[in-house]
Amino acid sequence: MKITKTLTAALLAGTVSLLAVSAAQAVTLRMGNGGEPGSIDPHHAEGDWENRIIGDYIEGLMTEDANAEAIPGQAESFTVSDDGLVYTFKLRDGIQWSDGTPVTAGDFVFAFQRLFDPATASSYAYLQYPIKNAEAIASGEITDFAELGVKAVDDTTVEITLENPTPYFLQALTHYTAFPVPKHKVEELGDDWTKIENVVGNGPYVLKEWVPGSFLRSEKNPDYYDAANVAIDEVYYDNTEDTTAAFNAYIAGELDILTAFPPDQYQWLQDNRPGEAHVEPFLGVYYYVMNQEEGPLTDVRVREALSISVNREVIGPDILTTGEIAAYGWVPPGTANYDGEAYMPDWASEDYGSRVERAKALMAEAGYSPENPLNLQLRYNTNEAHQRIAVALSAMWEPLGVNIELFNAEVAVHYDALQAGDFQIGRAGWLLDYSDAANTLDLLKGGTQQGDTMNWGNNYGRYNNEEFDALMDKAAAELDLTARAAILHEAEALAMDDFAAMPIYWYVSKNIVSPAIEGFVDNPSDIHRTRWLSKSE
Amino acid sequence: MLSYAFRRVLGAIPIALIAITACFFILRAAPGGPFDGERALPPQIMDNLRAYYNLDKSLFEQYFIYVGGVLRGDFGPSMSYQDFSVSELLAIGLPFSLMLGLVAFVVATSVGILAGMISAVNQNKWPDFSVIFVVMIGLIVPNFLMANLLQLLLGVYWNWLPVRGYVPGSIPHLIMPILILSLPQAARVARLMRGSMIEVLGTNYVRTARAKGLGARLVLARHAIKPALLPVVSYLGPALSGLLTGSLVVEQVFALPGIGKYFISAALARDYGIVLGTTVLYMGVILLLNLIVDILYAYLDPKVRYR
């Protein structure tokens, strides 16, 4: 009897709480945000799922418009000196943190100093290395933070000095590493300022609730300067690590936006919910690295044979089934500051059969044939899609006399091996940090000597070409954007003709957006700030 | 019995220490580290990170720092969830996982025992066959598949329950997770109960009870249930620890705020703090449960008590 009573009461309470939610008039956006945020501190965050939260509650000097292009955010206006080195930002009037404290130039100076402070150990601090003395401070060479190229001229003026002219710097300022942090809170609470009960922001939303493993919730910030144009009142950033469950929830109407979906549901979506899946080009390249430090892949003929015998056109439509676009170059289509014709090798338009024949001939020249096969190991991190591609490519290489041994490992082990050069062919992927061609081309720059070891950074394949490096340096010093683009095109062609690495496909972003949501503009950065969205019932 | 319990508790201490030590060093021997991700970090940033987490110290120094912390109840920082310490994450997630596990445990044992009894009493008749059918399904369908099926049926097509997610205080959100979590355990309990009940019903003392004229219900209640429960009870410890540690799939699928999901994600991310923290915690829970079961066993079976 007592149990029945308790149960009834509990069920009643549940029903009442459900009713209460539906009775509220607030416009709520429920976003399937992907992973669990590791940190909502802009200096510790690392992923796009964190960016979606942080970019809603903090705003930098620059922010993104609905197309993800850089527009003034907390800055009302800015000027750039003629030599491209000094940026001066004028802050908006009356901007404040969500606890009422004014946002001042000092908050920005403090934030950049904290970003580069070795004690903060911010993993993405290097994205702001264009700023003068930033790298030296992060590495501990300079300990006086006042030497950093970020200064408060007065309370509402921020002046940023760069090491070199950087054409993408305004875009870089939209990245969360350039966001301000509330100086008064961080000084008082240290890293605890991001505890949900302490956190304050200056963005269109204010964080209200965090249930680790489940969701974060934010509410519209009434004090935001553009609050009048913010249509969504409340946002849930749901943990949707299980994409199948999230997809079911979307179909049941429990989520409005999904930032990923199970690939095997794509066809169903296209058939039953046309227009809701947004599969769009995204700034990123999926590629294989070939170890050029030692072994058979130092031979350019072998690299060429492997690369041209990959039928990239079948990978998106048939192997991944979500329509990824075949990649033949190194800079994704749509990348900013990269006018001019996209790199496309002659062999890409060659008939696939004759490409295979040519590849066989190249392998024969290098001394390999089906009778005298080349044995290679292909490493990839454990994932079904990676496996499908690896299997498909092994099959494409078999006629050339290449025996592939597949070796998969979890992410940490995989990248550890790539960084150590302990591989022959390895899978890798690169999502651009900001829209600029140098951001992918830098992956192919030669290593730097550090003590008695070479640091190859993200150049896992250890492609080493002084001519390429010289072009990259030349581009970095070039102020004129058109001339710079031409130099970068030259560098891309050089590396690709060397088969420095094997691009396979361009990434696509995969969102599902409910028809009730308006203002969701597809863009190659895949950034869609909530302030531009609205929802009709 | 008290001294028996005391000896068991004392015996747990070296086990705990060995487990922590083994876990610590095995984890460090695994290739790859917490900062090996899709992209290589610049070396000075890597150095900063390593210093931040004391990873630049020698392994033994790190070990003593860690064990010292654990003794003070501090499990150190988390490298993948930086806004929380490991202790904070466990403090948030543990009560939820315990609640989920205990409710599922109560559901699984009561339903399982009842179903097993019904099955045994009606051996080879239709109630028996239907119980066996459900038991088989509970045992062979993996929980991620069961979760997907139930989500589609109860959530998407019939719209009876929310598909996933967590709303503090909302019971409908917990029904499916508990159902999925308890089904396989209920199935095991039912199978055990059925088997031992059939055995007990065939013993001489039950036959004697019947012969002296006791009704079927009284025979069951007075003479059959208690001995038939023995194999079930010895299974309850593993069942409960299985429910408490086995919630990881359910927590992940339904996005619930428990600690089960950290088990896998933290191990893959080489988040040393969380892996060790969850391991130590679960070890404590399992040691405790085994102790309780042993004591319960002694209560149910006098032979154990006096040995």
Image (cartoon, rainbow, N blue to C red):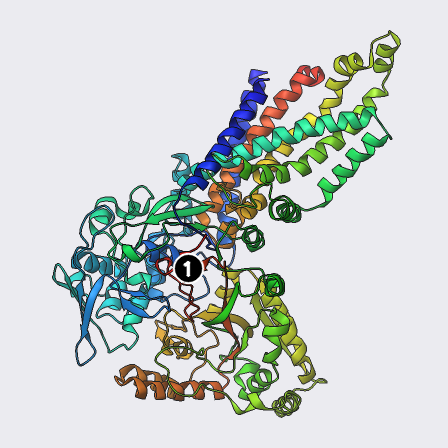
Q: Quadrant of the N terminus of chain B?
A: top right
Residue that extends furthest to the top in the rendered view of this protein: B212
Q: Is residue A460 left or right of residue A123?
A: right
Q: Relative to residue B292, is residue B53 depicted above or below?
A: below
Evaluate whether residue B187 shows in this view. Answer: yes
Residue A223 coordinates in the image, percent (x, y): 24, 51
**Mark 1 Cα-neighbour bin, 10 Å: few <14, some 14–19, many ≥20:** few
Quadrant (top left/top right/bottom left/bottom right) for the C terminus of chain B: top right
**Residue bearing the label numbered 1:** A47
The image quadrant of residue A272 is bottom right
* Image height of B210 relative to A51, above or below: above
Can residue B17 be seen in the rendering of this structure? Answer: no
Q: In screen coordinates, is A115 left or right of B153?
A: left
Q: Is residue A4 rendered to the left or right of residue B37?
A: right
Q: Amino acid at mark 1?
A: Gly
Q: Is label 1 in a helix, a strand or a loop?
A: loop
